[in-house]
Image: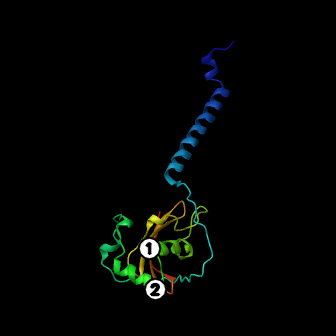
Amino acid sequence: MTSPKENKGSPNFKKRALIATCLLFSVIVVVILIRRYYTPPTTAPEQTSSSIQSTTSVTKPPELPESQYDDKPSNIKEHRLQEADRHFLVEKGLHDPINDLVRDLMRHNELIPCKGVLGGTPGFYNPDRIAVLSKDHVIADWEDGHIKGTIELSFVVSNGVISWTVVHSECGD
């Protein structure tokens, strides 16, 4: 009969200990990578066909003070549509301007000029991350389940039909 000390020195024990150590190390690395890079997928809004016109031309952003595009995180919900702008949009054919614009933008993921990664599809999946700034500008956050970005768009409303134009876009992580 062999003692436990003799078993620890055997080639079989060393081989098993090495395999167990490698497996443990692999599991730890996978857990760290998942915690760092995995974002739970969000449910894409129902894609419906609409008669809304869309343009995807990228235009130069307007000349704005440098502080507008600084790296400070902002709360997108701090932006409020002024009553005069809301009234203007109602006159152009939108019944509920903010909700109509948000719903329409969520149907136009093709406006996002950034490509998805790891099989993700960039989209406007969170209506709370879309802010109507004025009668002709919107800022929105998009994501694909792995990366996030921000996009500024201008729009024109004519007889209730919304046409979008990308003003500035940031592809991020």
Q: Residues within 10 Å of mark 1 (few under 14, many from 20)?
A: many
**Amino acid type at image mark 2:** Lys
Q: Which residue is mark 2?
A: 92
Residue furthest toward the right? 1
Relative height, residue 167 to residue 125 (above, below): below
Mark-to-mark CA distance, 2 and 1: 13 Å
**Amino acid type at image mark 1:** Ile
For image coordinates 65% across by 24% down, the residue present is 10
Q: Position of residue 108 (x, y in %)?
A: 55, 75
The answer to whether any part of residue 113 appears in the image is no
Q: Nearer the viewer, residue 5 or 122?
A: 122
Q: Residues within 10 Å of mark 2 (few under 14, many from 20)?
A: some
Q: Position of residue 38 (x, y in %)?
A: 53, 53
For image coordinates 43% across by 82% down, the residue present is 89
Residue 118 marker: none
Relative height, residue 38 to residue 63 (above, below): above
Lower sequence index among marks 2 and 1: 2
For image coordinates 64% across by 20% down, the residue present is 7
Q: Nearer the viewer, residue 87 or 119?
A: 87
Q: Quick check: 8 left or right of 162?
A: right
Q: Nearer the viewer, residue 158 or 149?
A: 158
For image coordinates 35% across by 70% down, the residue present is 79
Q: Quick check: 117 left or right of 91?
A: right
Q: Position of residue 20 (x, y in %)?
A: 61, 34
The answer to whether any part of residue 99 appears in the image is yes
Q: Which residue is mark 1?
A: 98
Q: Secondary structure at mark 1?
A: helix
